[in-house]
Each structure stands twice: as structure tokens, then as C-alpha cells.
Image: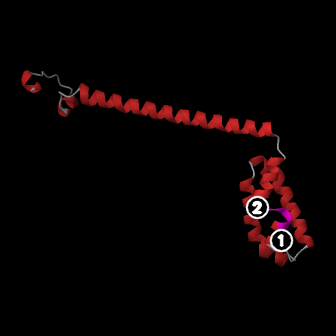
């Protein structure tokens, strides 16, 4: 019996991962342990069972998720969706705000460095010496 369980253990892990992906976090915590217990009892009664037999007994991950959602309260699901959308909106707004601040800073730096100080050479600015701009410098 244990040898047969080891033979499908890798397939069962993959099956459990698929179920976990199909379920929300709350469903994973509550439903997945019950599914595992049911599969273990099924395998104890049917030691020759294959992964296909287990899937036929328990159901596909999609079927399990569909049944889970069918048993949930619609208003609870709607609230979760609205909360998720609100979080996404806030995060995107923050990202856009940070990008706008960065672009404004870059434009300010460009205007300050290129447009405001075009008549002075880098050496003159670095030395900090006073200098006089004549008409020939402007031409």
C-alpha cells in the first residue's frame, strides 16, 4: 500500500497545487486539508488507485473551485472584488504620482541647467569666480 502511495505522491502534489491555485486563500486554508484527508482515506481503502481514480473521486481543480464559489455568499465575493479594485487603483495612483514628480524634477533640472545657465562655461561655474558677460559672448 505505501509503495503505491509513493508512486502517485508526485502526481498528488501537483494535483494539490492545481487545487490551491484554483481556490482563494480562505478556501485553501479551509477546504484543502479536508480534500487531502479525503484522498488519504480513499487511498487507504483503494491502495491500487491511480491519480485518475483520485480525480474521478474528488473532482478536477476547476470543479472544486466552481463548487467552492457556488457555496459562497455573493455579497462577500462582491466586497472582495471591490476591495481588490480599490487597492489596485490606489497603487496605480501612487505609481503615477511618483512618475509625475520624477518627470517634473527632471524637467526642472533640464530647464535650470540648460536654459538658465547657458552663457556660463562649466569651468567658470565650478571655480565660483565672478565674470562679466559681454556682447561678443552673446553672439
| Majority secondary structure of magenta residues | helix
Q: Residue at x 82, y 78 (%)?
A: 3
Q: Quadrant of the N terminus?
A: bottom right
Residue 85: x and y in percent read: 65, 37
Which region of the structure is painted magenta?
A: 56-60
The residue at which mark 2 appears reads as 16
Q: Residue at x 76, y 40 (%)?
A: 77
Q: Is residue 37 left or right of residue 77?
A: right
User: Where is 118 relative to 3, above or below?
Assistant: above
User: Where is 47 relative to 103, above or below?
Assistant: below
Q: Residue at x 80, y 39 (%)?
A: 74
Per the image, is 120 magenta?
Answer: no
Q: Quadrant of residue 138?
A: top left
User: Where is 32 relative to 139, above or below?
Assistant: below
Residue 35: x and y in percent read: 84, 59
In the rendered structure, are the residues bearing label 1 and label 2 in contact, judged by CB atoms less than 8 Å apart?
no
Q: Which mark is residue 38?
A: none
Q: Quadrant of the C terminus?
A: top left
Sort mark 1 into few (<14), some (14-19) or many (20+) by Cα contacts within 10 Å.
some
- Taking depth in this image into account, of 94 and 58 the one nearest to the observer is 58
Q: Is residue 111 left or right of residue 89?
A: left
SS under mark 1? helix
The residue at which mark 1 appears reads as 53
Q: Residue at x 76, y 59 (%)?
A: 61
Amino acid at each position: 500500500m505505501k509503495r503505491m502511495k509513493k508512486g502517485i505522491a508526485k502526481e498528488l502534489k501537483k494535483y494539490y497545487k492545481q487545487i490551491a491555485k484554483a481556490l482563494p486563500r480562505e478556501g485553501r486554508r479551509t477546504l484543502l486539508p479536508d480534500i487531502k484527508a479525503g484522498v488519504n482515506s480513499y487511498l487507504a481503502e483503494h491502495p491500487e488507485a491511480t491519480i485518475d481514480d483520485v480525480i474521478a473521486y474528488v473532482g478536477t481543480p476547476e470543479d472544486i473551485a466552481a463548487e467552492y464559489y457556488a457555496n459562497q455568499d455573493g455579497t462577500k465575493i462582491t466586497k472582495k472584488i471591490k476591495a481588490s479594485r480599490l487597492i489596485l487603483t490606489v497603487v496605480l495612483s501612487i505609481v503615477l504620482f511618483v512618475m509625475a514628480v520624477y518627470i517634473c524634477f527632471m524637467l526642472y533640472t533640464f530647464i535650470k541647467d540648460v536654459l538658465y545657465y547657458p552663457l556660463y562655461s562649466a569651468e567658470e561655474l565650478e571655480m565660483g569666480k565672478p565674470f562679466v558677460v559681454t556682447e561678443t559672448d552673446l553672439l
